[in-house]
Amino acid sequence: MMSSSKVSPFLSARLSALRSYYQKQKNIWDIGCDHGLLGLSFSNEEEVERIHLVDPSAAVIKELQNKLKDSYITKGEILIHHQHGQQLSIETTSNCIFIAGMGGKEIGEIIIHLLPSLDATSSVVISPHRKILELRALLRELPLALVQEELIFEDGQFYQILCLRKGEGPRVHPYGRDIWKKEVGKHYRDHQMKYFGVHEDLASKGYMEYLADPKLLKST
Ligand SMILES: C[S@@+](CC[C@H](N)C(=O)[O-])C[C@H]1O[C@@H](n2cnc3c(N)ncnc32)[C@H](O)[C@@H]1O
């Protein structure tokens, strides 16, 4: 299990799960940070030197600037970037990059943009909200290994979380392997079958066949 021992009591189950993939890197990147809760939850983490909060929305940036103006941070440095993730320059090493709450298309573009700057000390932890099958298909083609994946259910919504590392290792599965485990996985399978069962395209049909495979049920 990749969990760091600390889970913030101020974070939702989804943000706590994302945070648990932190592996003592020096640089935190919260891309599409919005409220900034995930990135800022690292402000007292011993090994963290810089927290980067990234968002293209002027309103979000203003709010973050106001939030940080009167706060005092005990460790490290907090940098706010008014930018799209697709334009970002990152450190050469020791990055923990979170990209959550965006569509699969944007997440894929950001990962492709950052890929040349990544090394094996950096992790990319993602939680796409839309176009997940399309993103999985793209990630399979990139030199990224899947470290771990899980499924979170919160406030009536399912969230896939994938932790990736550049280099050799198991590739991202087109439909996911470990997310179908436990009760939550069974409920997610039912939810996905209901949603994709009405679609007639080949990709949806392939996904439906995978979901209906008895072997998938055995692993839950
Ligand atoms: C739904 S919020 C997610 C906030 C937080 N990451 C979370 O998961 O709770 C999505 C945020 O992504 C930002 N965003 C949209 N497109 C982006 C892009 N291309 N690069 C970086 N951030 C982006 C939006 O401005 C918004 O603040």
Image (cartoon, rainbow, N blue to C red):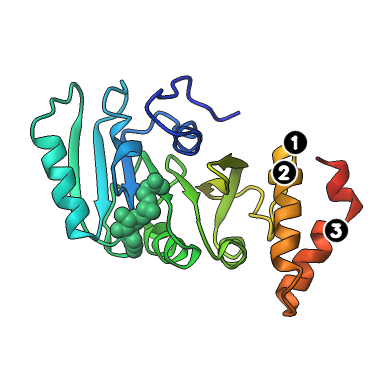
Q: Secondary structure at mark 3?
A: helix
Along the line of sight, which residue is nearer the eye, 126 or 164? 126
Q: Which mark is residue 182?
A: 1
Picture disc at residue 185: 2
Crowding near the residue tagged with mark 2, few <14, some 14–19, many ≥20 C-alpha atoms within 10 Å = many
Amino acid type, residue under disc 3 in the picture = Ala
Q: Amino acid at mark 1?
A: Lys
Question: x and y percent of residue 218 in the render?
Answer: 88, 42
Instruction: Say which mark, if any, is on residue 212.
Output: 3
Dot 1: what SS?
A: helix
Using a 10 Å C-alpha cutoff, classify the residue at mark 1 as few (fewer than 14 neighbours), some (14 to 19) or many (20 or more): few
User: Between residues 39 and 35, which one lies in front from this camera angle?
Assistant: 35
Mark 3 vs mark 2, CA separation in Å: 13 Å
Quarter holding ligand 1: bottom left
Q: Are marks 2 and 1 in contact (CB under 8 Å)?
A: yes
Mark with earlier residue (1, 3)? 1
Residue 50 image position (x, y, % from top left): 24, 36
Disc 1 CB within 8 Å of nearest ligand 1 atom: no
